[in-house]
Image: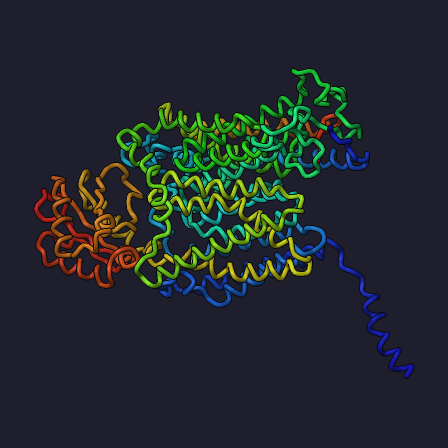
Amino acid sequence: MIPASHSSPADSEGRRYSLRAQRLAIGALAVALSIASVALVAASAPWQIRFPFVAAAAVFGPAIPALRLRPELSLGECLVYGMGADVALQMLVGLVLVLSHVWAPVAVSLGLLVVTFAVGLKLLWDARDIKGQVCTPQHH
Amino acid sequence: MLSSKADSLRPAIQVRSIRPLPPFILMLARCALPLAGLAIGLLSLTTARESAIGQYGLIQALPPLYFVSLGIVAISFILAWRSPQPRFPEVILCMISLVVLLQGAPGIIESEPRFSTAWLHAGFTDFVAQTGRVLPKIDARFNWPSFFTGMAFLGRAGGLPNVIILLKWWPVFINLLYLPPLYLLAKLVLREEKKAMLAIWLFPFANWVGQDYYSPQSVAYLLYLVLLCLVLGPYGASRKGVIGRLRRKPEDNGLIADNPGMTSRYHTCGRFAGACHECGARYCKCCQPIQHEHQKKPPDDWHPQARAHAITLLLVMLVLCAAMDTGHQLTPVFAVATVAVLVFFGRTRLLAWPGVMFLLAAAWICYGAVAYWAGHLTALFGGLSTVTGNYAGNLRLHANAAHGDIVHVRLLAAGVIWTLAAIGFFAGRKMRADRTAAAVMMLTPLFTIAGQSYGDEAGLRAFLFSLPGALCLVAMALTSVRPGLRPILTGALTAALIPSFLIARWGNELFERVLPGEISAMNALYRIAPPGSSMMALTSPMTWQFEKVGQYQYPNSNIEQFASNGTPSPARLVPGLAGQLRKNPRGGYLIITSSQLEYAPTAFAPPGWGADVEKQLSQSHLFRLIYSNSASKIYQVVGAHDSGQP
C-alpha cells in the first residue's frame, strides 16, 4: 500500500518556493554560462579565460537545467545525474564527431551551448508559475 | 561571606548578558576553521622541497605544518559532523580542503605534473584534438576512445593549446566530482545524512589506488558512481531477492510496500507514482487515487508525468552506459556485475538493465574494439583459467625493503577498511540502512577480478570499485557505538588513515614523479629522431608520446618479463637491446632516466644494476651517447641507418 502524505500546507508552500528558487538559480546560471562561453569562443579569447567558462558550461549544461525541469527530482539528484550525463554527453559527442569524420568541435560545442541557453530560458520561464507542478514523490 | 557569594555570581550574570552571535556570523566563524586549515596547508606545501622526496615517497618532503593543517581540517569536520543538525557548509568546506590538501600536494611540490601515463594520455588527447582521428592499432586505449575524444572536444572548444596544462590539478578536480555522487549513494544506502557524511569523509583517505590521474578510468569511475545512484535511487527497490521470490507463498506478491526502510523514494507498486505535497492528498490531483494502488490499477496505467520522468532517467542511464562502454574497458565489467547482483538481491527494479548494459558493452567491443581483440583473445579470456594467479599477481611483494613496506601499508589500509566493513555489516543489523546493497557493492568487484588479472592491476581496481559499499559499511560500524564514542572513533580512524594514505598513495613518488630533465630530453629526442625510428625505454616508467603520437615506433624492452627468470645481466642485455633496435632501418634510440633507475630496484633488479647497464652501454660500442642531462641519457644504436644527428 502507498502510505499517505504527511506534508502540511506550509511544507508544500516551502517546497514550491524552493523549487522556484532552484529553477531560477539553475536557469540563470545556465543562461549566464552559455552566453559568456559563446561570447568568449566567438571572440577567440585566451584559453586562460575561455577554458574555465567553457568547461564549467560543459559540466553544467544542458543536462542539469534539463533535469531541473522535472519536479520529481531533488536538487541533489538533479545535480548528480545532470553532471554525470553532461560529462558522458561530452565524451559521446566527441566520439560521434571522430567516428563520422566531421571534426568540428568549436561549432558543435557552440550548438551545445545554444541548447543549454534554450533549456535555461525554459527553466526561467517555467519558474514564473510553479503552481500545479509540485508533484514530488514522497520521501521515505 | 555575602560579598564572596556576590563575586561568584557576577561572572554568571555577565555570561548571561552576552548576546549570542547571529546564526550567519556563527556559520562564517565555523567555516573559518577549515579555510584556515586549507590556507596553512597550502602555505606549508610551498615551503616543501622536491629533492626531499625519498624511498617512502612524498611523505618525507612534507613539512610538519602540513600535518597540522590536516589535523585542523579533521577537527573541523568532526565538530561539524557531531552537531545534532548536519552543518552542510562546514562539511562541504572540510571535504574540499581535504581533497585539495591530499590530492594537490604533488602538484605544488613537484615542478612537473606527475605520472608518465598521464602524459601519454595527454598526448593521445592532443592527437585527437589536432587530427580528429584515433589510432586503434597504435595503442589498445584508442579502442575505447571516448575519454580522449571528449577531452579533445572540450579542449578545442576551450582553446587549450594542449591538455598537459590540466594534468597537475586533474586528481583534485576529479576527486571533487566524485564526492556528490558518493554522498547521494551513501545517503541512499545508509538513509541518514550524518552517516553518509562520514562515509564520504573517509573516501579521500581510502582512495589511495591512484587511478584518479588524467585517465579514462578516472572519468569512467565517476560515471559508474552516478549510474549506481540511479540504479539504487529512482529505480531502487526493497524486494526479496531472486531466491526469496522463488520461495514465496502464492498470496505474497514479493513486495514489501510499506517497509519504512526501503531503498527507493518511490513506491514499489512497479510504477512511478507521486504523492502531491501541494494538496496534501495521498495521491496527485492529476491522477485518481485508485490508479496508484497496485492491486486495483488497470494494467497499462502510467502517470503522464511519471512516464516522461522514467524515460528521462532511462535516457540519462543510457548515455552514462554508452560513455562508459566506449571510454574504458574494465569499468563496464564492474558496472554490469554490480548491477546484476543488485538485481539478484532485489535492490533495483531494473531487472533487464544488466542485459542492456552487457549488450551495449559487447556491441562496442564487436564494432569499435576489433583492432584490440582480433588475435588477442587469449589475453582477454586466458585469465579465466588462472583464477588464483589473478589474485596472486596483485599481491606480489618486491625485494626492495622500502617498497615492500609501502606495499604492506597498502595491504594494511585495505585490510582495515575491509575489516571495519565486515564489522559494520554485522553491527548494522538493527539500523535502517540497506546492508545488502552495501555488501553487494563491496563484494561484487572483488569477485569480478577472478576472471582477468588486467596486468596485475585488477586487484587495485577492484579495491577502488569496492570502496563505495565498503565505506558505507564502515560508517555503519563507526555509528553503531554509543554516540559519545563516535567522534573519538572517527578521529582515531582519521589519524590512522592520514599517514597510511600519504605512504600508500604517494609512496612511489621517487619514480612516479616526472623530472623536468626527462621532459627536455624527450623534447630533444623528438627534434633529433627521424620519423619512423624506434624509441625504447630501459624499463617501464617513461614519460613520452606526449607529442608526435603515431610518428615513431616504441618497441618494448621486455626486461621485466625476462626478470621473472632472474635479473638480466648487463653484459647479455645490451647486445639484445641493440639487436632489437637495429631491426628498424630508420634508427633506434635507447632512453634511460632517473625514474627508471629508481624503479628497477623496487621491481626486479639489485641496487647498482642501472649503473652497470650504463657502463656496459658506453663500453660496448653498440650504442653512442647523443644526449645527456641531470635526469636522462639518450643512446643511439650504432649500425642502423642513422640519419638524425645531434
Where is B2 relative to A15, above or below? below
State whether residue B591 appears in this view: yes
How was the colour assigned to the protein in this rendering? rainbow
| Count of numbered marks | 0
**Does B616 sit left or right of B311 as displayed?**
left
**Does B58 sit left or right of B134 as displayed?**
right
Occupied quadrant, residue A132: top right
Instruction: Choose between A38 and B644: the one closer to the eye.
Output: B644
**Outermost residue toward the bottom in this view:** B1
Q: Quadrant of the N terminus of chain B?
A: bottom right
Query: Residue A65 location, x and y as percent?
Result: 60, 31
Occupied quadrant, residue A78: top right
Query: Residue B351 location, x and y as percent?
Result: 55, 27
**Does B114 sit left or right of B444 as displayed?**
left
Q: Which residue does the image show at 39% across and 42% down from the upper left? A: B163
**Does B624 sit left or right of B130 as displayed?**
left
Instruction: Choose between B272 and A8: the one closer to the eye.
Output: B272
Query: Residue B454 location, x and y as percent?
Result: 35, 41
**Outermost residue toward the right in this view:** B2
Instruction: Choose between B297 and B532: the one closer to the eye.
Output: B297
State whether residue A60 appears in this view: no
Query: Residue B15 location, x and y as percent?
Result: 81, 68
